[in-house]
Amino acid sequence: MNNFKLEPQDQQKLDQLFGKLKTEATHFIGYPCNLGFDYTELYPFLHFAINNVGDPFVSSNYHVNSHELEREVVEYFAQLTHAADNYWGYVTNGGTEGNMYGLYLARELHPEGVVYYSQDTHYSIAKILKILRMKNIMIRSQENGEIDYEDLEETIRIKRHVTPIIVANIGTTMKGAIDNIQKIQGVLKNLAMPTQYIHCDAALSGMILPFVEDAPAFGFDSGIDSIAISGHKFIGSPIPCGIAIAKKENVDHIARAIEYVGSLDTTLTGSRNGITPIFLWYALKTRGREHFKLMVQQCFEIADYAISELKHIGQTAWRNPFSTTVVFNYPSIDIIKKWQLASYQDIAHLIIMPHVTKEWVNRFIADLAQEGKQP
Amino acid sequence: MKQISIIVKNAQGVLTTIAELMAERNINITDIEAETVGKTGVLIMTVDQYDIALQALRDTGFNAISEESLLVKLKDEPGALARVAKRFSTAGINIRGIRIINREGGESIAAISTERTEEAIKVVEDILVS
């Protein structure tokens, strides 16, 4: 313990922040973050300057790391995404870093490639494309948020001389729609494209679909090249994190020697979070696949309950199959602010995560119904 | 002078709001025009403090596009963007990106990132919004 003490006014500020976070967390229903986690047992690890700098699969001179657990986490997700033995990956700072990694790989492999992504793709993809200076064309979406395959085919057709790099959404941000990898492969086959690259943004649904029977295939066995899945979303973590996985043969292509840490580093950043791999490892080990299956099932049930209650008060509400995102009419700005809802044009959504119970839904519906009664 | 395009549901209805927003930040609007694409309005504005104006509009929730893009109106149907991309390809003009900005009432507005040259403008002259 150190002897440093906060000044009373600073302590008050900190206490206020704690109080605010505690209150705000009780009506957090619009963003895909599971608040149902408890990592108390891991707090002793916070006494160390854990840094996972470098490639988790290559030994480094910085030994205060959690590479071993990180590799196990990557292996777990490699199995979920049917990567067989041809994979490489690491724990990222979140979905955006995983998407950036996938697109960076794609650009290195296909410098002249054009990126195709749907209108419903997360805004961070547009940011990444700008940073990486990749040529890109947005494809229109269908009403349910899924990419329009006809538009994709027509658009790729005019640029058949360049490699198509496709960002497939495995759960879009606003509607939870899933771009069908088989249909995308069908489009590419129809056009007889000699080369292609498919990156999946599976931020939320990458931890949902593997636990649902008859869910659409989105893994490496369906022909994808890389994938990004968030760790703080469905699993839950106080620190944002995610997983990037790519085909090993592609990653080897961009490997660069970094002598400073005596490591071959293909990750995007230098210093990397060493705590989040421990959190993820702990969550995966303590819950197990059967528990995740139950969590997913419970979320679907609550989502259907929310739809039914929303309809009961006159709302138009729906969800895509295999998604826990409930889409409904844009409510008032007060509701948006209080319940921290994401909105786009005339719709908003609830995202049913494992911490959201019927009681949460009832409180939300009561607020919404009350608003409807006001003149 | 740089140009900002703002996509709105009702162009006339928001003119005052935008004028007030600019006035609060001491930004002079040197020119403003309104166009209608289907059910959507597009305000094309030039100002003396471009960066501050663009930030203020985006902070207030407006769908504002910078002048680096060409805005075109299209039919909202599969292949419409492909046909525009082909025009540029035929003319030998490189496109950095094409993005759908709005879809409503059977029409859509797309932003095309390319060098805003006379040649590029000519390629889409018949469908150019700004």
Image (cartoon, coloured by chain):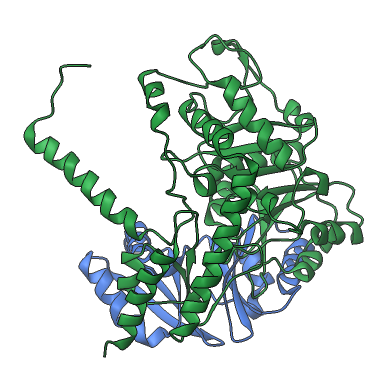
Name above or below for residue A130 compared with residue B110.
above
Q: Nearer the viewer, residue B10 or A299?
A: A299
Q: Position of residue A306 (x, y in %)?
A: 49, 72
Q: Is residue A346 visible?
A: no
Identify by letter the chain in green. A
Residue A322 in picture, x, y percent from top left: 65, 62
User: Closer to the camera, A13 or A262?
Assistant: A13
Q: Is residue A23 visible?
A: yes
The structure residue drawn at horizontal position 51% and vertical position 24%, both measured from the top left corner, is: A270
**Quadrant where the N terminus of chain A lies?**
top left
Q: Nearer the viewer, residue A15 or A37?
A: A37
How many marks overall?
Answer: 0
**Is residue A17 depicted above or below A340 in this figure?**
above
Residue A48 sits in quarter: top left
Q: Which chain did the image draw in blue?
A: B
Query: Which residue lies at the image location 60% right of the left edge and 47% below the top edge?
Result: A292
Q: Residue at x 67, y 51 (%)?
A: A211
The percent position of residue A65, horizontal first and vertical second, equals 51, 18
Residue A280 lies, in percent from the top left, at 53, 34
